[in-house]
Image (spheres, rainbow, N blue to C red):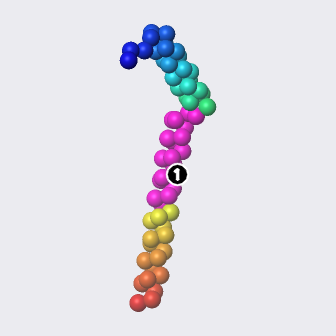
Amino acid sequence: MRESAGRRLAYAVLFAVLAGFVVAFWNPIDHLKADLRADGQGFKFSIELATHLFELGLKRL
């Protein structure tokens, strides 16, 4: 069940190259920053919508 050292080295090189491509073409920090901005704007929109609906409910009373 032991794999050869060559096969382990090949897997290590393959995963290192794949990780390099992921970082080069998909910068996780930029995506994280964009997600945080979108979450903040979405929260603001949710509060505004809830306030508007609450005001509509008060008008009906």
Q: Horizontal and vertical percent for residue 8?
A: 46, 15
Q: Is residue 57 left or right of residue 16?
A: left
On the question of residue 41 being in view, the answer is yes
Q: From the viewer's perspective, is residue 61 above or below residue 27?
A: below
Magenta stretch: includes residue 30: yes
Magenta stretch: includes residue 36: yes
The mark total stands at 1
Extreme residue toward the bottom, this view: 61
Q: Amino acid at mark 1?
A: Ala
On the question of residue 16 being in view, the answer is no
Q: From the viewer's perspective, is residue 61 above or below residue 9?
A: below
Extreme residue toward the left, this view: 1
Residue under the image location 51 percent in, 46 percent down: 35
Q: Horizontal and vertical percent for residue 28?
A: 52, 35
Residue under the image location 47 percent in, 53 percent down: 40
Q: From the viewer's perspective, is residue 28 above or below residue 21?
A: below
Q: Main secondary structure of the magenta part?
A: helix
Image quadrant in which you'd find residue 34: top right
Q: Is residue 25 left or right of residue 42?
A: right
Q: Horizontal and vertical percent for residue 2?
A: 38, 15
Residue under the image location 48 percent in, 74 percent down: 52
Image quadrant in which you'd find residue 25: top right
Find disc 1 in the rendering and name its residue. Answer: 38
Q: Secondary structure at mark 1?
A: helix
Q: Horizontal and vertical percent for residue 1?
A: 38, 17
Which part of the image, by quadrant, shows the C terminus?
A: bottom left
Extreme residue toward the right, this view: 25
The part of the chain drawn in magenta is: 26-44
Residue under the image location 45 percent in, 9 percent down: 5
Q: Nearer the viewer, residue 6 or 21?
A: 6
